[in-house]
Amino acid sequence: MTEFTLTINGQKASATEEMTVFEAAATAGIYIPNLCAHPNLPPSGECGLCLVKIEGQSEYAISCTTKTARDMVVHTDTPELRQKQRSALEKILSEHPNACLTCWRKERCKPFDVCLRNVKVTERCVTCPKNGRCDLQKVADFLDIGELTIPYTYRNLPVNQDNPFFDLDYNLCIACGQCIRACHYLRGMETIDFIKLNGFRVAGPVKDNHKNSGCKFCGACIDVCPTGALMERPGKWLGLPRHSVITTCPYCGVGCQLSLEVNDGKIVRSVPVLENSVNQGQACVKGRFGIAEFVHHPERLTNPLIRKGGKLIDASWDETLALVAEALWNYQGDQFAFIASAKCTNEENYLAQKFTRTVMQTNNIDHCARL
Amino acid sequence: MAGLAASFGSGAMTNSINEIKDAACILVIGSDTTSGHPVIALEIKKAVRNGGKLIVANPREIELCRYADIWLRHLPGSDVALLMGMMKIIADEELADLNFVSECCDNFDAFKKSLDNFDLDFVEKVTGVPRDTIIEAARLYATCKPATTIYAMGITQHSHGTDNVLATANLAMLTGNMGKPSTGVNPLRGQNNVQGACDMGALPNVYTGYQRVDNPDLQKKFEVAWREDLSPTPGLTLTEMLDAACDGKIKAMYIMGENPILSDADANHTEKALKNLEFLIVQDFFLNETAQMADVVLPAVSFAEKDGTFTNTERRIQRVRKAIDPIGNSKPDWWIICQLAKKMGAQNFDFENPSEVMEEIAKLTPSYGGVDYERLEECGLQWPCPTKDHPGTPILHVGRFVCGLGKFTPLQYKPPAEIPDKEYPLILTTGRSLYHYHTGTMTRKVAGLNALDPEGLVEINPWDASALKIKNGNTVKVISRRGEVTAKAKVTEKMPKNVVFMTFHFAESAVNLLTNPVLDPVAKIPELKVCAVKIEGVKQK
Ligand code: SF4
Ligand code: SF4
Ligand code: SF4
Ligand code: SF4
């Protein structure tokens, strides 16, 4: 791998042969607008936005699929390029709700404000779950898109709610193909692909629904979707999380790193962490969709219970600990046994064996690891 | 993981998850990886996309078979025969890495002699795999390097599980696939922190880091650290505890975060044992089937409400971080144990937080010596990590084995403890679903997971099904020598003839009422993967 330099917007940048112009620019801190590139996915050139001008070439180049070369001279921000990019974006927006994107009031508009432009509720950014964290909005802002110069159609397709975990709003899909590439390349599945619905090209399950198309509900497609088309249903309308905590999935020995998003003391979402060597942004259905509901389940035990007259009755910690301490005095030595847990933390297992060996004076401790 | 410890002096995954994708050949045996360890399955698929060869050995047509170059559909319980058969071919065709064997390994001659018992006729008969397929697999594994073996509970949960593990270790040594990137023997641990629970000495015979309780020096070390006299007699294993409870020798039991009524082989026996106790404490966050029998239930918090660490299957110690406050009056398990110990007059349980507990663990445990919470912040650490400036160990046995030389073990084929007969003509094998975890205490509380996988099904081959006049969706009774359960039948080509399959997540069709509690003599793991059953249709009302 030899390193060389090239020039981007008059700035020297270093690259290797494997790198695309898009990557070289990103490494040099230069933003090229795009809607289908993702660091974990192979490039496709699908959205047609990331055009650049390479000196000595008559055609504009798609930067995410063009490899760098020594001494290449690249421009990413000429007025002609911006105009080209705007037309590419307009083509996308001709089938995507865009009134809010081009409205001068968008910064101040709240979901329930009266819309001065009579935009239907379903076609507003302010009523879209992705509002504020949407890549399409970012690109539209960056390119400073104005009123569309080509006609716009609302697709008026139904929202696909065929599974318990996520929604697919075909009206918001910009056919960038990121979800499809995630499903194919990251997961080795072929659940989704480009499909035609009412003549519109969108991403969707290849058979009648996700499950029958082989979906494993891993959610990889949701994470890469740049728009509000793919959204997990839990926490869909909560917007950006108030705070999030990175922790380790409790469901199997892989130990995926998950970011638990918390609003008002409740876990609303669990998203795999991108930068780590264990799961690299991936998880499975259990880690992604199986956490909040059991943690906040109404049947969670909230008080100690003591059996009285054959029934388990609520008790205080003081009373319960005193009772257990009192009882355990009678069983020191080999008449006592502790079953620890492969679900508990290291520290807890450590304390369990220390307690058994010191306080209870026996080595009768084991756990269900053998299973 | 007693088997691995015997061969290499350590019982954990020898290599790391992110090396799998670069393997030239992968043998996946006894693991339905896409269900049990989905994210590791992604690495296997990546390896295949990178041009690596995949050999899947499994009686069921698991999802990975679609990506496999060779699928060895051996009969449940015939793993030793299959692996030894492959090794005989490798040895006979002089494909073994004799340099590695002579430099790094011990006991090769005795092992080689034991291969004589595994001629292809015998292996073909016992495993049910055509000889050509076995030859092809053996050649592939021996010639594509680096090669790695991945296995899970399908290897260990047998009455001869230790032999199975030793066989995989023999194979890795014979082909020189040890101590290098993308090689090794890689057990995928079932529950999230099995590795950590073992590392922490939640075992009857060892303190933390596998330091034996019957070693006087180590006993002394812990007596000094804990300021308490300690017993040098190894304690009872889980199954022995339950037997001792039945006999009235164990009178009080403290169960933390487990539900043995659903998870142990032979549920009726477990229930009898627990009923016989004078005092049962259960600490959990739900009133699970075991907690309902307790005298005292202590409400613990879930992983989301506490700090701590888990150690994953590649020996990586990773942080668990508190995301929300405890629900109701529930408390972290570490807090409860400390309070109780203090109530009982113990001096050494004054911990303010789990980070302080880790400091004590690091002091007493050589392999965790360099671990502290600050260092774990970034992306955890893989043990052994003996000192504060040690970077952790992604690959074990680089250059030499932890115990000096890797030890070959001569092996014999032993049939499963219970083989099908006239009365119980089918083999029942068990496994996991992608949508549920363990006994379902957590996942069955999640509506979406339940909707996708609502009930335990009996998977059966169409041929067996039609012989028994069972149609897809019929309710059937599965009967073993120990008990019976009812469940719906799923007729599928994915099952081989004479073998049926159930998952073990469902209380209402608890497969452990059926399974055989006979133990592996070394690892003391019950034979959950093979037992003999018969199936009867249930008259639909
Ligand atoms: S997907 Fe983005 S651009 Fe489209 S409506 Fe939602 S927020 Fe607006
Ligand atoms: S959830 Fe996973 S398997 Fe299903 S479509 Fe999305 S990426 Fe594919
Ligand atoms: S669903 Fe999202 S990721 Fe998939 S093609 Fe449409 S916009 Fe792109
Ligand atoms: S997200 Fe899935 S693969 Fe990852 S640790 Fe959790 S259960 Fe295992």
Image (cartoon, grey):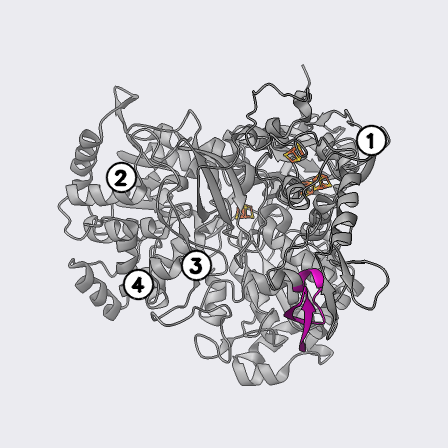
Q: Chain of mark 4?
A: B
Compared with residue A110, is residue B179 higher up or lower down, i.e. above or below? below
Q: Position of residue A287 (x, y in %)?
A: 53, 42
What residue is drawn where x is 33% and y is 68%?
B366
Taking the view exactly as shown, the residue that stands out farthest to the top is B541
Residue placed most toward the observer, B458 or A25: A25
What residue is drawn where x is 48% and y is 45%?
A259
The kind of residue tagged 3 is Glu
Task: Give the spatial CA distance, label 3 vs label 4.
Answer: 18 Å
Whichever of labels 2 and 4 marks the residue nearer the N terminus, that label is 2
Residue A151 numbered mark, or none: 1
User: Badge 2 is on which residue?
Assistant: B252
Task: Give the spatial CA distance, label 3 vs label 1.
Answer: 51 Å
User: Badge 3 is on which residue?
Assistant: B378
Residue B261: quarter of image: top left
Magenta region, residue range: A2-24
Q: Quadrant of the N terminus of chain A?
A: bottom right
Q: Secondary structure at mark 1?
A: loop
